[in-house]
Amino acid sequence: MLPISMQKRKSIYEKIKPLINGPNTRIVLRVVALLLLIVFVDSIVNSYNINKKLHSPEFASKIDRQNEYTRMFRYQRNIYISGFSLFLYFLIFRSQSIVADLSKMEVNQDAIAKQTKNNQSQVETLISENEKLSKQLKDLKKMEKEHQAMKSQAENTSKEYMKLKEEYNDLLGKKTKDQKKKD
């Protein structure tokens, strides 16, 4: 990785991404891989044929033998170079796909993190509103109990007043309206 910040790496990758992920680039890279594969297979076949020729009893001349060893060395060298190049091609191809997937996941992660923050702030506001409403509910229940107590106290006071009024009227000898109606 480059020794630069993640933000700069992302911006560089975003600029290069259309070039790397373009359809023409993929075609070119696959053609190059196919050519490397052809060179690899051709080198293996030619190396095998030369090895077969060197170990046959028909070969007697030292000069021809030396030339064949030189050709075999070249083909073996091509096997190693093209094989290693193919290996690196697949390694780079896989690494590039992993980086692309990782960048997609990072974008998704950022979106999910923002969504989580929004949800968390909404939850906090709802919790605070819930606490306020529960406090108001408790206050209303307390006021209702006080109202019931005052109502029962008022009824008791009214009954006591009526009772005292009747006793007062009895003492004075006056008839109340109810008593007059009964007569």
Image (spheres, rainbow, N blue to C red):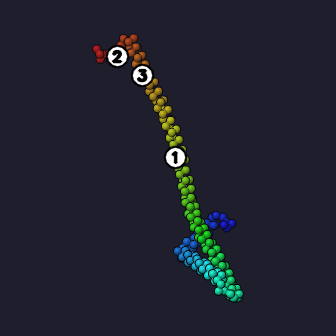
Give the image location of residue 120, x and y in percent.
Answer: 55, 50
First in sequence: mark 2 vs mark 3: 3
Q: Quadrant of the N terminus?
A: bottom right
**Do we see residue 67 in this rendering?**
no
Horizontal relation, residue 76 to residue 159: left or right = right
Residue 62 at what x, y percent from top left? 71, 87
Image height of 129 relative to 24, above or below: above
Q: Which quarter of the picture shows residue 97?
A: bottom right
Q: Disc 3 designates what residue? A: 158
> Where is mark 1, residue-wise?
126
- Comparing 101 with 59, the one in front is 59
Q: Amino acid at mark 1?
A: Leu
Mark 1 or mark 2, earlier in chain: 1
Q: Secondary structure at mark 1?
A: helix
Dot 1, crowdedness within 10 Å: few (<14), some or many (≥20)?
Answer: few
Answer few, some or many: residues within 10 Å of disc 2's Cα (few below 14, many 20 plus, some between 14 and 19).
few
Residue drawn at x 53%, y 41% as measured from the top left: 131
Res. 85 image quadrant: bottom right
Which label sits on residue 2?
Answer: none
Q: Amino acid at mark 3?
A: Ser
Q: How far apart are the alpha carbons under marks 2 and 3? A: 17 Å
Where is mark 2, residue-wise?
176
Question: What SS does tag 2 mark?
Answer: loop
